[in-house]
Amino acid sequence: MNLTITEACAQQIFHMMKEEGKENSYLRIGVTGGGCSGLSYRMGFEEEKSDNDLLIEEHQIKILVNKDDAPLLDGVKIDYIQNMMGGGFTIDNPNAIATCGCGSSFRTAKNAGTPEEC
């Protein structure tokens, strides 16, 4: 599985880990049903790895991806963009064939998810 986070993204994640006292945690990246397009991204910190997790390390950040989510996240690039309006994570997913206007949900050719009204 190929998943990339940029240096700017890694720096923001390190900052968030420190703020939340989660310096020794994993970063979980996953997919859940919902959103305008059917699938939504989720990110958070976790203390433990399960047998169903793939472990990826990028910029010294240990990233967990559930094996079931791996095909939907293969090739994803996550960045952190800071501008005059603030900052936020951006996700470039080559598997997505459709995304919502805000960019937080998507669908793939093989998985339409469970779309909700916006």
Image (cartoon, rainbow, N blue to C red):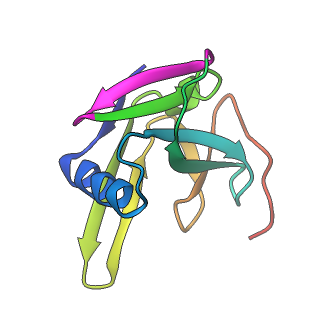
Q: Nearer the viewer, residue 58 or 108?
A: 58
Q: 102 above or below 106? A: below
Q: Where residue 36 sits: x, y (%)? A: 70, 60
Residue at position x 50%, y 33% in the image: 73
Q: Quadrant of the C terminus?
A: bottom right
Q: Which residues are magenta?
A: 51-60
Left or right position of 93 against 111: left
Q: Where residue 85 sits: x, y (%)? A: 32, 84
Residue 102 occupies which quadrant of the picture?
bottom right
Q: 101 above or below 23? A: below
Main SS of residues in magenta = strand
Q: Where residue 42 sits: x, y (%)? A: 58, 49
Residue at position x 70%, y 58% in the image: 35
Q: Is residue 53 magenta?
A: yes
Q: 114 above or below 1? A: below
Q: Is residue 32 magenta?
A: no
Q: Quadrant of the N terminus?
A: top left
Q: Where residue 57 sits: x, y (%)? A: 31, 27
Residue reaching furthest top? 51
Count of picture labels: 0
Residue at position x 33%, y 53% in the image: 13
Residue at position x 50%, y 46% in the image: 45
